[in-house]
Amino acid sequence: VRTGVIDQNGTVKFDVVVTNQGTEPMTHVTLSCRFDPALLPSRATPDHRYDKDTNSLSWTLPTLRPRDSQRLEMECTAVRPAARACNRVYAKSLQGDSAEAEACVEVRAVQPPAPTGLTMNIASLATPAAVGREFSLVVQVANRSQFPEEDVTLTVLLPPELLPVRLGTSGPAGPPRILPHFDGQTIRFDPIPKVSGGETRTYRIQVQAQKAGDVEVEARLTSRGKLQPIVQRAVQAIIPRD
């Protein structure tokens, strides 16, 4: 198992080896790896199950003979800074044998380069949010260059765990008035005709939390002069309602 320091948005690989050190076969061996919120599993040995609510991977090994071992591999993306982000491993057999272990890494925040041109930032006004509660996501779009950007258009993609709320969702102050348009979990705002150099525009997206867990919000920004959209993602923590 790898430990140490990794950068945010980097990956870390964990190798877990389960060994039967006894003299009798073990059957129905279950292995569960629970990850702290800063670690999001991205790849793993086949035949695993992923539980989004607990951010965990699990496997079931039908039989493990004496002195036999089984290696399971998994890779995680570091989605947020953390002084200590851990993978906690639990193994248990039908015969009652059990074992536990953990491996932890530090996730280091990466300083972004000085921005130029259009930039975008997503911030939540609820950290964390509670199931059933409404809260706002704020997206700030800034033009860091000296030149104006035209037809600046924001699109926000919400995960199923966040219900879009029309009342409270708004574009930047006009004129002209920038209206939101709803299509399922996608919210697209009218284009801003021009964002001058040094100018910042603010959008507000009202949502209601539906289910506990860590979910991802994606925002896409386009303009007349951009061939590819600017994409920004943010992870939102949702906790059970008291």
Image (tube, rainbow, N blue to C red):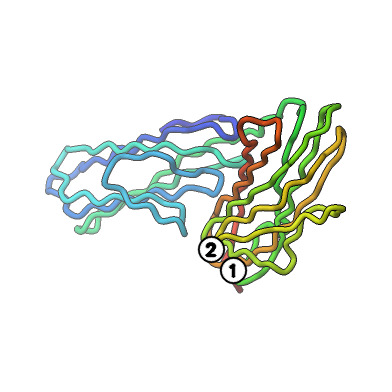
Q: Quadrant of residue 51?
A: bottom left
Q: CA distance from mark 2 to mark 1?
A: 6 Å
Q: Secondary structure at mark 2?
A: loop
The residue lying toward the viewer, choosing from 172 and 68, is 172
Q: Quadrant of the C terminus?
A: bottom right
Q: Label 1 is placed on what type of residue?
A: Val
Q: Position of residue 19 (x, y in %)?
A: 24, 40
Q: Secondary structure at mark 1?
A: loop
| First-in-chain label (2 vs 1) | 1
Q: Could you classify mark 2 by the number of other residues whose Cα lies within 10 Å: few (under 14), some (14-19), or many (20 or more)?
A: some
| Residue at figure coordinates x 69%, y 63% from the top left | 206
Label 2, on which residue? 212
Label 1, on which residue? 131
Q: Position of residue 186 (x, y in %)?
A: 58, 55
| Residue at figure coordinates x 61%, y 53% from the top left | 236
Q: Could you classify mark 1 by the number of other residues whose Cα lies within 10 Å: few (under 14), some (14-19), or many (20 or more)?
A: some
| Residue at figure coordinates x 82%, y 28% from the top left | 145
In the depicted structure, whether residue 10 falls above or below residue 217: above
Q: Position of residue 49 (x, y in %)?
A: 33, 52
